Image (cartoon, grey):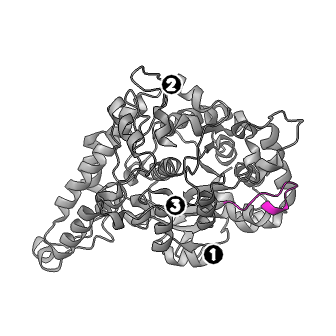
Amino acid sequence: MASETIHEPEGTTSDQVVTPFKVSGKQDYTRLIKEFGTKAIDKALLERFERATGVKPHPLLRRGLFFSHRDFDRILSYYEKGEPFFLYTGRGPSTGSMHLGHTVPFDFTKFLQDAFDVPLVIMLTDDEKFLYRSNLKLEDTIEMAHENAKDIMAFGFDPKKTFIFSDFEYMSGHFYQNAVEFARLVPFNQVRGTFGFDNSTNIGFINFPAVQNAAAFASSYPMLFGDDAKPRNPRNPRTSKIPCLIPCAIDQDPYFRLLRDNAHRMSQPAPKPALIHAKFVTALQGPEGKMSASDATSAIFMTDTPKQIKDKINKYAFSGGRETLEEHREKGGDPDIDVAYNYLSYFLEDDAELAKLAADYRKGDLLTGELKKKCISVLTDYVTSFQGRRAAVTDQTSELYMAPRKMEFGGNPNPGYSHPLSSEIGQPNGAQARDDDSEGAEAQDEATNLKPTRPGLGRKTTYGIRGLSSYGGAVTEMLYPTKSREPDAGKAEQ
């Protein structure tokens, strides 16, 4: 469906537009929290997360880049009690490469999977892409989904508890039953107001919210939880009660508001999904836009060469510096609007170093060219590391992740236990193994000669082998068995 058939969905204003189909204007996230009716992620919530998991919050949480939530506190209650839940996120397939903005939710979801030790489902909406883009053939969107799936696998999700699926290939059985039942609950007036559909919108696209929302029902994945997956057998009411947590950008929230309003009306009532929302990664041209796959000058792509990254940052990255060197030295720059600093806030690990860069820039001690040089270095390392992992993803890897199967996960090993905060025990970066598994994790590190590649994750995650390590995790013994591992080495993760 052509984009011009979408007209002013709810939640838009003349100067700030945030919908599933369009994001424009300078974003006021405080106003979005108020308009969308979400809650800000505050210090108390982050401390509760750390006490529950023993893991210091991800830099994207600490820096407010994941800034808003719906019922994340309720998910923490489930975890604290040792009750099950699962993660759900997704991607609309596209040609070519992912860009930096696409990587943020997957990096963060990987962190959550490691911290909580829970199942994850990743939906590739090749059906939505076909319905939305009238110039695409159906077969093209399926092929795009499979290529994008390999990009996602390169983030190192644990295949023992990760299921990646194409809508065209998976949607049947209990999943389709949930989609149809949910669709019957929602009148056209409700989706028209939420998404801006009109008389020219094709009926497939009008129905798609039911499909995207059905993916948030645990009973849509009977095999993941050990249920009978035969379509004629009823959905398991016990499984239906398992909630999910959805990490996503804030523009996807309208889909799940619809779900939260209606989940309890299903024949097997499901809990409202919890959400945790990300800000948009700014376009190279500045805070008025976000990165776009359709504009090569707006984004750093994950296939870019070091030279391309350097050229884009130097040529296009909006600067918060002053007009002249003398004025910059005297008055300083503004890191809040500087794109190079914005990107560093996402991808530079060290909080103290980031704070010093901002302070020096404001004082005029740090010049725009020097800030861009640091940004280029960090992004080059990030992108080239990803490229190495992506090159190691094979068809065998893809078949494993995309095969419906029972998941292996542990959840909370110590329900009711409260971990000390990293600030209370004085460990740098908050890197602390759980009390009951620190020795096992260290032993496993020695056995595999692996170290987490991203500081501050807390536990050591060590299933990265043969070059597919990402933030400490990757394809496991399920793909590449090694004799050097002890039979029970994986228990340190649980």
Q: Residue 405 vs residue 13: left or right?
A: right
Q: Quadrant of residue 333?
A: bottom left
Q: Label 1: how many residues lie within 10 Å, few (<14), some (14-19) or many (20+)?
A: few
Image marks 2 and 1: residues in contact by CB distance under 8 Å? no
- Does the rendering let one see residue 368? yes
What is the spatial separation of the Cα atoms under label 2 and label 1, in whole angstroms? 44 Å
Q: Residue 424 vs residue 280: left or right?
A: left
- SS majority, magenta: loop
Residue in the foreground of this view, choosing between 414 and 259: 414
Circle on res. 37:
1
Image marks 2 and 3: residues in contact by CB distance under 8 Å? no
Give how far across and how far down residue 190 sits, in percent.
79, 66
Give how far across and how far down residue 401 sits, in percent.
58, 32
Residue type, numbered disc 2: Leu
Seen in the picture, residue 469 relative to 264 is either above or below; the reply is above
Instruction: Tell me the magenta residue range.
Output: 263-273
Please report whichever mark, 3 or 1, sits nearer to the chain's N-terminal start. Answer: 1
Residue at numbered disc 3: 52
Seen in the picture, residue 187 relative to 36 is either above or below; the reply is above
